[in-house]
Amino acid sequence: MTSGEPSAGLAAHVLDSAVTALAAAGVPSPRSDAEQLAAYVTGEPRWRLRRTTAITLADQDRFQDLVARRAARVPLQHLVGSVGFRYLTLAVGPGVFIPRPETEVVVGWALDVVRAAGWARPICVDLCTGSGAIALALAEELPGACVHAVEVDPEALVWADRNITDHGFVGTDSRVTLHRADVGIDPAGHGRNDGREPATAAVQRLADLVGRVDLVVSNPPYLRDDERDTVDPEVGMHDPPAALWAGPDGLAGVRAVARVASDLLRDGGKLVIEHSDRHGSAAPALLRDSGCWEDVQDHLDLAGRDRFVSASRRSREH
Ligand SMILES: C[S@@+](CC[C@H](N)C(=O)[O-])C[C@H]1O[C@@H](n2cnc3c(N)ncnc32)[C@H](O)[C@@H]1O
């Protein structure tokens, strides 16, 4: 039999031995991952896999290879090259943070705010955009929005640019603009927090937007340095370090984003920042203490964990 010919039955035994291998490697959802890899290789939807009685030897080899890499804790999304995020399918791989379901909830809350306020043509900014997930979801679900995506990491910028193009936001009149700029995260955790910091590189780069933005949404790095030994291998070995680590208290990203947002937002503009589930008190306190924000509230994710903070830009005349 050649590698192009079918062999009998992908079904039960091939899938079951993949599940066993993934479970032994500590993969948290072995059956789901095995089925997703099989669906990726065969092009069959997951629900039809058990009825699939033929798979080429080449596909079987490919499947075994992917299962072995998943057992070595390469993220599933890197193996299949994409991740679903709200209504989008985003390209991801080495060099960019994989968007998480928690962030879909953050975006959903921001969308509700814009719709409830009746802002027909909001100017939105996604600070620390990574793959472009938040920016693209805002553009996709708010047809009148003009969205600016900000990222500093050159590798992440390549993925964001690809996703923006793949979703049709191209050309000079595109509603999504990608900016290479540094929001000024200080991993040492230093820096004043009184809203009077010198303009960061991001603010200088976005000078045209200062005081004009309606909505800033961000999922910045937010892990504490001492969490390095506790993260899953998929995270520690495959998410870019710049996407994860935020100093000894894990708040360097939140601090920097709040500072940039306080310059960009118009009075009454909305800020939404995702944070660690350990920061349900610290992140709101940081915003309240700065004096730039009012209506500061913290919010839960779908698992009931503290997950994001929202606030309105206080009037500058205050
Ligand atoms: C947790 S990831 C989030 C990515 C994306 N927003 C998402 O939710 O999938 C944080 C992102 O912040 C970027 N980042 C880190 N430091 C930055 C800085 N100083 N300026 C701009 N972006 C930064 C990282 O490169 C990474 O892409």
Image: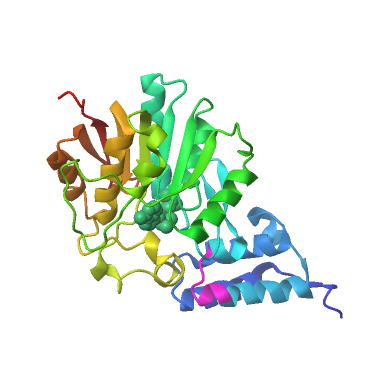
Q: In the rendering, at what x and y percent does residue 182 appear?
A: 38, 52
Task: Give above or below for 177 relative to 16.
Answer: above
Image colouring: rainbow
- Residue at 37% across / 46% down in the picture? 202
Determine the quadrant in which ligand 1 lies.
bottom left
Q: Residue furthest left?
A: 289
Residue 169 lies in what quarter of the image?
Answer: top right
Residue sitting nearer the eye, 160 or 210: 210
Q: Is residue 305 visible?
A: no
Q: Is residue 294 left or right of residue 128?
A: left
Residue 11 in view: yes
Q: Nearer the viewer, residue 144 or 177?
A: 177
Residue 72 location, x and y as percent? Answer: 51, 77
- The magenta stretch spans residue 72: yes
Q: How many numbered marks, from 0 up?
A: 0
The residue positioned 51% from the left and 44% from the top of the image is 178
Can you say which quadrant of the picture contains the C terminus? top left
| Image quadrant in which you'd find residue 267 | top left
Does the magenta segment cover residue 84?
A: no
Which image quadrant is residue 197 in?
A: top left
Task: Give left or right: position of 79 versus 284.
Answer: right
Q: Please give the name of the residue rendered at 28% of the width and 60% of the height, measured from the top-left corner.
A: 246
**Which quadrant: the N terminus?**
bottom right
Q: Position of residue 119 (x, y in %)?
A: 41, 21
Q: Is residue 183 above or below residue 264?
A: below
Please state the extent of the stretch shown in magenta in the rendering.
69-76
Give left or right: position of 175 versus 210.
Answer: right
Nearest to the observer: residue 30 or residue 209: 209
Q: Residue 233 at x, y = what percent?
A: 41, 72
